[in-house]
Image: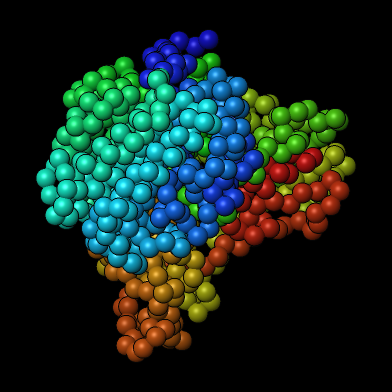
Amino acid sequence: MSTEFPRLFSPLQVGGMTLKNRLVALPAGTSMVDHGIPTLGDTGHFERLAAGGVGLIIGGATVVHPTTTLRSRKLVEAYLDEFVPSTAAKVEVIHRHGARFVGQLCHLGREFIGGESEAAPVAPSPIKTVRDAYPPHELTVREIEGIVEGWRVSTENLVKAGADGVEIHAAHGYLPAQFMSSLTNRRSDDFGGSFENRMRFMRMVMEAMRSVMPVGFALGVRLSGEEEIPGGMGIEDCVRIAENLTDLGVDYFSITHGTRGKYVKDSTNPDAVAVPSASRVRAATGVTTLVGQRIRDAATAEHAIKSGHADLVGMARALIADPDLPVKSETGRLGEIRGCLGINQDCRAFDPHLHCAVNAEVGRGRHAGVGIKAPHAKEVYIIGGGPAGMEAARVAAGRGHQVTLFEKEIELGGAARIAAASPHRAAFIDAIDYLERELRRLKVDVNLAAGIEVDDIAEIRSTADHIVLATGSRPASPPTQLSGRPTASVDDVLLGSLPEVQGKRALVYDEGDGFWPAYSAAEALARNGWQVTFATALTALASRVPAESAGPLLSRLGEAGVELRVGHSLIVPDNPADTLVLRPLFGVGDIETGSVLTVWHQPRIPVTPFDMEVGDGVSVIGDCVSPRRLSHAIAEGYRAGAEI
């Protein structure tokens, strides 16, 4: 047993529960919910977390009252009677693996997290959030009392289900925070005005919950150390609130940063951003303190505890990427950990529920062929060493097949390695590094600078029992009408292969993708001193970039002086001496671009050098089928490796 992280893997008493270690799976809803009730898929996800060795699991996306349900009913509704047996089954499997379970209870108030509701939004005051279309209804005292009763009933249901505790979500700008903040609470009655009045709702909720909690049932409160919005609450407010609540018997505080749209930090943010805030709360209250938010490894967690900043450390996305992170860290298998990239793609899309870009089992379950030896070991040849081919090799080798991989370049990684060269996207290389380590561990025969030609296929067919084609994609050539003008592909920009252009002015044109490539090219050019105009035929900016990343991305582009234009087509005159023109799709007013380097982003082109169809003994996966996202490549590689 490793002693590298002795504090992290030491027990801790919180309320009446003994935790086997200090690692916490933070609340992250799965949307595997039917009419407000968790499904078997949801239970399976939580069992997988518990089996990976985490000490405590906090179940999130659980609401307390009909006024805060979504039309889709994809949030867990703890006030329903049917919640009890489904949650009891979840608690039972979590306990079976030695972990503890706390249910986090929430009321969104004026926030509706991007989903429609049959009820009107509600809040202490009728102040509209910029994130939603409608102003909230100002709660009456009677309505407030009804919501408090919802918290009591929901807590009682958690007790009946055998949970070990309950957490109040009073962070991220949801209803309790709306009452506590003078920015969102403009009431003149007993629930507004003074600090004591603004705390009244929260204290009523806690007292109602305490009335149905047995001795030892843990009570936690989640607070935002910094709301990160103009006029929002900061760390001084957070400390004052925590001190005020301590006398009500809080067993732990969970400290985070941000409000809705800001609290799921992507790879542009520093790691462990909330640790200083947690340290302040812990020092001021003496109460057990949990900190999370962009903490991705055991070393960071150990340091936070060793330095006295926190008692517990939480992870959400890192445990989605690799539920076995705790046991691998504790047993010294750090090289086997599949790291979270922090790109907020599949884990935040909920299409239709939780998935992960690097872990194909999330949202799909473990394939029946994974984790057991294949009945007959085969010779498997994989052509292409991008994410799809590497994942296929990892899974196939793990099942006992003899795997040989050929990659024409001198490095593995394919298009993902190029994406990693984008500003603030270097974490992409973590996925490639993980797969490389796994291929070495599993003794896959990797051949670099080993391009396979058509003439080689006959020999490969005679040797291999199964062939996996994962030959990837290439950037599209510039449109022919740009001939004679300075051009570059997104790949050229990211890899620094650019022609000389007098004046260093560039036009990046996104034909209709709305995803990262063109935006990354614009940011890379701006960082290197280019004057950049970004234009797109789409009617919105960054329309396919994850919501938590789009705002920071556009802010960076704006701060770098990038001119942003939507709803424009790019017109190329026949005479190369004439300037390019941006033409509005709606209305009039052509814009001449002047002398520019043109980066015209078009879809990548599949590389399909071999005439082989999918069938017995042949799999075709990844970008060579259709150039898409990392998550598609990983999922198809996983499935191909599992089914050989």
Q: Residue at x 59, y 50 (%)?
A: 34
Along the viewing direction, whichever of 321 and 564 lies nearer the viewer: 321
Query: Would residue 111 be visible to someone looking at this image?
Result: yes
The picture places residue 50, in percent across and down from the top left corner, at: 55, 27
Q: Does residue 284 sit above or below 630 in this rendering?
A: above
Image quarter for residue 352? Answer: bottom right
Q: Residue at x 64, y 60 (%)?
A: 626
- Judge left or right: residue 524 versus residue 33: left
Residue under the image location 81 percent in, 48 percent down: 618
Of residue 258 and residue 5, the one placed in the foreground of this image is 258
Residue at the spot 47% in from the left edge and 76% down from the top edge: 482
Residue 128, given in percent of the width and then of the height, sits at: 27, 63
Is 547 above or below relative to 426? below
Question: Which residue, as the protein is rendered here, is positioned at the far left?
Answer: 194
Is residue 296 or residue 221 the one in the foreground?
A: 221
Side (left or right) of 5 relative to 642:
left
Tell me residue 330's x, y (percent). 50, 17
Q: Would residue 330 be found to the left or right of residue 542 on screen?
A: right
Q: Using the image as rendered, state which of residue 147 and residue 98 is in the foreground.
A: 147
| Quadrant showing the C terminus | top right
Q: Quadrant of residue 612?
A: bottom right
